[in-house]
Image: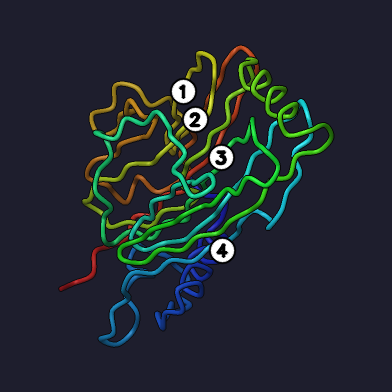
Amino acid sequence: MMTSVSLLVALLVSLQCVFQTSAHVDNRKRLDNNIQPNAPSGKRRLGDNLRFRSTPPETVQLAPDSRLVLKCVVIGRPAPNMQWLKNGEPVDYEIESNDILPAEPSSIVEMVSKIVVSSAISGDIYTCVATSGIKQKSASTTVYTLEGNDEENLVTLQKLFRMPVKPVITTYYSNIFQNIGTDVVLPCRLDSNSETQLYWHDNNDKLVFGNSRMRVLPSGGLLITNLRWSDMGNYTCFAKNAYGSDVIETFIYPLKPSKA
């Protein structure tokens, strides 16, 4: 379920430090689900928080006949939303938006978002926008193309975009802390231009199928209803097509709800 208790403690403390909370974790030998990273000591409550863990460099170079993957990693409470802009305009995705549940206020999430750049004109600006509650942060990178003129590069990359390639999982949670008894959706969104198989393994490394509390949504996300302490662990999303595969893991830590 987890590699070690010490690893879990280190992750939890890291998230607490990011949000600059005053929560205290005692040094009891037994770790239980009373740890509350979203409930600082005293009466002061933790509000919306958002911070980038990593962003793309300010400038990148795109060579002919290649593809570029830009990545943002953000921590947010509640669970953040991520969007990419190209030259200030939203990048369109085919997303089944009707199966996404509202963000649970108790959740703390480390989220990864990627964009695959397969065609660009030198000087295009890509911006990662993260939103959590009322807070929003953004980070931009400028793509410069190498060799040839802009029109030649654009034609070459448009041809490349139509070539079948392995899938890239573009949106997922690395870690999520959320209250027991709530419903959680673990996203697993793809960039793929050919037929791709997507499936999940649960925290016991078993295929998610025929489970009354867990099901894979049309968007690729994994819905877990009525979260339990026994659900703690790593969940794995696999994406495969004829040209390759990609895989990610999401760690869930169920929290004991704080008393009102």
* The residue positioned farthest toward the bottom in the image shown: 42
For label 3, count other residues whose C-alpha is less than 10 Å away and answer few (under 14), some (14-19) or many (20+). many
Q: In the image shown, does 41 or 69 lie closer to the viewer?
A: 69
Residue at left 43%, top 49%? 82
Label 2–label 1 contact, CB within 8 A: yes
Q: Please give the residue where the numbered disc 3 appears in the rendered image.
A: 115
Q: Which residue is mark 4?
A: 6
Q: Is residue 154 visible?
A: yes
Residue 16, given in percent of the width and then of the height, sits at: 46, 72
**Gap in angstroms between the C-alphas marked 4 and 2:** 33 Å
Q: Residues within 10 Å of mark 4 (few under 14, many from 20)?
A: few
Q: Nearer the viewer, mark 4 or mark 2?
A: 2
Q: Nearer the viewer, mark 3 or mark 4?
A: 3
Q: Is residue 104 above or below residue 146?
A: below
Q: Nearer the viewer, mark 3 or mark 2?
A: 3
Q: CA distance from mark 3 to mark 1?
A: 19 Å
Indicate which label's residue lies in the foreground, 1 or 4.
1
Disc nearer the start of the sequence (3/1): 3
Q: Secondary structure at mark 4?
A: helix
Label 2 vs label 1, nearer the camera: 2
Dot placed on the residue nearer the N-terminal end, 4 or 2: 4
- Residue of label 2: 190
In the displayed structure image, the side of residue 92 where residue 151 appears, left or right: right
Under mark 1, the amino acid is Leu
Residue 206 in the image: x percent, y percent?
A: 44, 28
Residues 33 and 197: in front is 197
Depth check, mark 3 against mark 1: the one in front is: 3
